[in-house]
Image (cartoon, grey):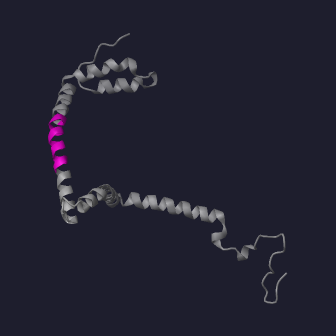
C-alpha cells in the first residue's frame, strides 16, 4: 500500500523490515564490517609504508612517556630548583653519559669475541666444534646441518659410523 504521495506505508504490526529502497548503506552489517576491515588494513599498510617516520616517532613518544615523571619530579622538587628546560637537558646529558659508558665497557668485549670467532672459523676449529653437535640434531635436519658444517672452512672431521 502507498500513501497519498506515493510512498510506501509504514510496516504493519509484525513486519519490522524496511524495503531495500529505504535502507541506507550503513544499515547493512556486512558493508560496515568490510569497511572496518579495509580501514584497519589501510592503517597498518600506511604505517608500514611510512615506517621511516613512524618508528622514530614511536620511539620518541615512548621516551617522552617514560621520562615525563622524572622531569616533573625534578621540576617540583624544592631542593633541586630546576626549570623544565634545565631538567630535560640534565636528564638527556645523564642518559647520554650512561650510554657512552656502557658502550665503552662493552665495545672491547664485542670486538675481542668477534675477532676470536673469525679466527676460529678460519683455522677450522669452529667446524670441529660444531660437528660434535651432530648427535643432537634431529634426523630430518641432519642433511642441512651437514651441508652447513661442510660449508665452514677447515678440514672435515672423521665421520662416525
Instruction: Name the spot of residue 10 as percent of width and height, x first.
Output: 80, 79
Q: Residue at x 63, y 70 (%)?
A: 26
Question: Quick check: 125 left or right of 145?
Answer: left
* Closer to us: 30 or 68: 68
Question: Quick check: 20 left or right of 145?
Answer: right
Instruction: Name the spot of residue 83 as percent of width and height, x first.
Output: 20, 65
Q: Quadrant of residue 34?
A: bottom right
Instruction: Name the spot of residue 28 as percent of width and height, x first.
Output: 66, 67
Q: Quadrant of residue 133?
A: top left
User: Where the C terminus falls, by quadrant?
Assistant: top left
Indicate whether 149 appears above or below 35: above
What's drawn in magenta, residue-wise? 97-110
Instruction: Name the spot of residue 141 as percent of width and height, x first.
Output: 42, 25
- Chief secondary structure of the magenta portion: helix
* Closer to us: 85 or 126: 85
* Closer to us: 139 or 34: 34
Q: Residue at x 30, y 59 (%)?
A: 68
User: Where the N terminus falls, by quadrant?
Assistant: bottom right
Q: Residue at x 33, y 27 (%)?
A: 148
Q: Residue furthest top?
A: 161
Label count reads 0
Q: Quadrant of residue 106?
A: top left
Q: Is residue 15 magenta?
A: no
Q: Residue furthest bottom?
A: 4
Question: Quick check: 134 left or right of 83?
Answer: right
Amino acid at each position: 500500500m502507498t500513501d497519498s504521495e506515493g510512498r510506501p506505508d509504514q510496516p504493519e504490526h509484525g513486519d519490522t523490515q524496511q524495503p531495500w529502497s529505504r535502507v541506507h548503506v550503513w544499515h547493512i552489517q556486512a558493508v560496515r564490517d568490510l569497511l572496518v576491515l579495509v580501514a584497519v588494513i589501510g592503517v597498518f599498510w600506511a604505517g608500514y609504508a611510512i615506517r621511516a617516520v613512524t618508528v622514530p616517532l614511536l620511539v620518541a613518544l615512548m621516551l617522552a612517556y617514560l621520562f615525563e615523571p622524572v622531569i616533573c619530579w625534578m621540576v617540583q622538587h624544592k631542593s633541586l630548583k630546576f626549570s623544565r628546560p634545565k631538567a630535560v637537558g640534565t636528564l638527556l646529558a645523564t642518559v647520554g653519559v650512561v650510554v657512552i659508558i656502557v658502550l665503552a665497557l662493552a665495545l672491547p668485549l664485542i670486538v675481542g669475541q668477534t675477532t676470536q670467532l673469525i679466527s676460529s672459523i678460519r683455522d677450522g676449529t669452529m667446524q670441529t666444534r660444531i660437528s660434535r653437535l651432530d648427535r643432537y640434531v634431529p634426523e630430518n635436519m641432519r642433511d642441512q646441518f651437514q651441508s652447513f658444517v661442510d660449508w665452514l672452512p677447515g678440514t672435515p672431521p672423521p665421520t662416525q659410523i
